[in-house]
Image: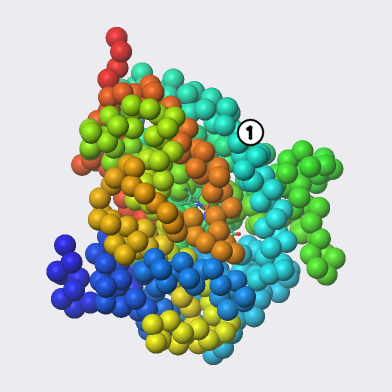
Amino acid sequence: MNTPVLADFSYDPFDPAVMADPLPYYRVLRDEHPVYYVEKWDTYALSRFSDIWRVLEINDGTFVASEGTLPAATVLAKHNAGPVPDPPLHPMPFHANFDAPIYDGVRRCTSGQFRPKPVAELADRIRELANERLDELLPRGSFDLTQDYGGIVAASVVCELLGLPVDLAPEVLGTVNAGSLAEPGSGVEVANARPGYLEYLVPIVARRRAEGADGGLPVADSLINYRLPDGSAFTDIEAATQMLGVFIGGTETVPKIVAHGLWELSRRPDQLAAVHADLDANVPKAREEMIRYCAPAQWFARTLREPFTLHDTTIEPGQRIITLLASANRDEREYPDPDEFVWDRPIERLLAFGRGQHFCLGVHLARLEIAIMVSEWLKRVPDYRILGDAASRPPSSFQWGWNSVPVEVPVEV
Ligand code: HEM
């Protein structure tokens, strides 16, 4: 598998060949070039689990997402002469571009809703949404497991959390999917995609402001009531911009993991039978392997504010690192036989949700949704066939995941 890659090795996250299948590149990076310099982007790619684990736990201002956590090629093309300062407070971009205390303060506005207790209270509703979808889909006999099942359920949960009517879930799903498609050579043009997203989010903020923002819709209301350290408040557009993480993160990752995970189980009847034997006990274990094996996000970026040395390479202020989380998930130094799907593999440490300052805000919701969607599926669909030849995983530097997984189920007559 590695031969063509090794013959004349170079790695660029936006190279069409990398975007089409990054895994062989990651293996070479881990083995031969754990701190790989991509000159064109003045960026170092970190690929080993232990290095990424160590770097992401450093929250002392050495690594800041001042150019965004997911910069497009146009941003990386500009080489910095030194540290990149925080952007101006207004108009405020997505808060991840700031360091503490601004980043932390704004993140707290959205994070309250995603703590373990409020998330656990969503379980019954998520189960209901999953079963409503299955009621509609199963009689059809064939449909798309990513989009039609997990996609609609996850987008419906996002709609309810953000204050949009659930009928909009298919539209929201389509909009987020379209925004995440990456062009070879340039990455994700998030800046272009945002106006489409804001058309949904700005009216929510305007409505809640008019209604008094009394806390009834926690994400929007806490953003409206938040005051920055200089005493200023967000405009509607600024508040809506801070909701993008939930809008995008909540919609696009979970469905790909659920569909791909169910596919991997179906290819291994012994593993499927083992999970089936006790869904309550075994789905949570299988879920962790699904997240490790199937998580589609490839990497996130940070820009250095202080010099940092790793494996004898010193990275200077203004240069960037990209943490190849998808490589860490397949690092043989952390997980024996990492390219095998093993439903009950011991997973002591996981980087799929990131680590440290930017650790996934939706981690508890993601785990709950995956467990419920997998369980409800396995309860109701003991026998299913994935049409693997028709499945599609579009090239991407950002979300390299199974966007479309056609499935056939027996139709009862
Ligand atoms: C299994 C599914 C998911 C995975 C694997 C995942 C993964 C990640 C990762 C790796 C990051 C860190 C990015 C960085 O280091 O720069 C992140 C951040 C984030 N995730 Fe998730 N995510 C998932 C589901 C969700 C869900 C359901 C939500 C819904 C709320 C969500 C919302 C966010 C937000 C808002 C951030 C940005 C946090 C910040 O910068 O303060 N994610 N996610």
Q: Nearer the viewer, residue 353 or 243?
A: 353
Q: Is residue 392 visible?
A: no
Q: Is mark 1 within 8 Å of ligand 1?
A: no
Colour pattern of the rendering: rainbow
Residue 115 screen position, x and y as percent: 64, 46
Circle 1: element type: loop
For residue 9, which quarter of the picture? bottom left
In the rendered structure, the answer to whether residue 20 lies left or right of residue 105 reads left
Query: Image height check: is 161 above or below 185?
Result: above
Q: Nearer the viewer, residue 58 or 158?
A: 58
Mark 1: which amino acid?
Glu
User: Residue at 30% across / 32% down in the picture?
Assistant: 274
Q: How many marks?
A: 1
Residue annotated with mark 1: 121
Residue 411 screen position, x and y as percent: 29, 17
Query: Image height check: is 256 above or below 359?
Result: above
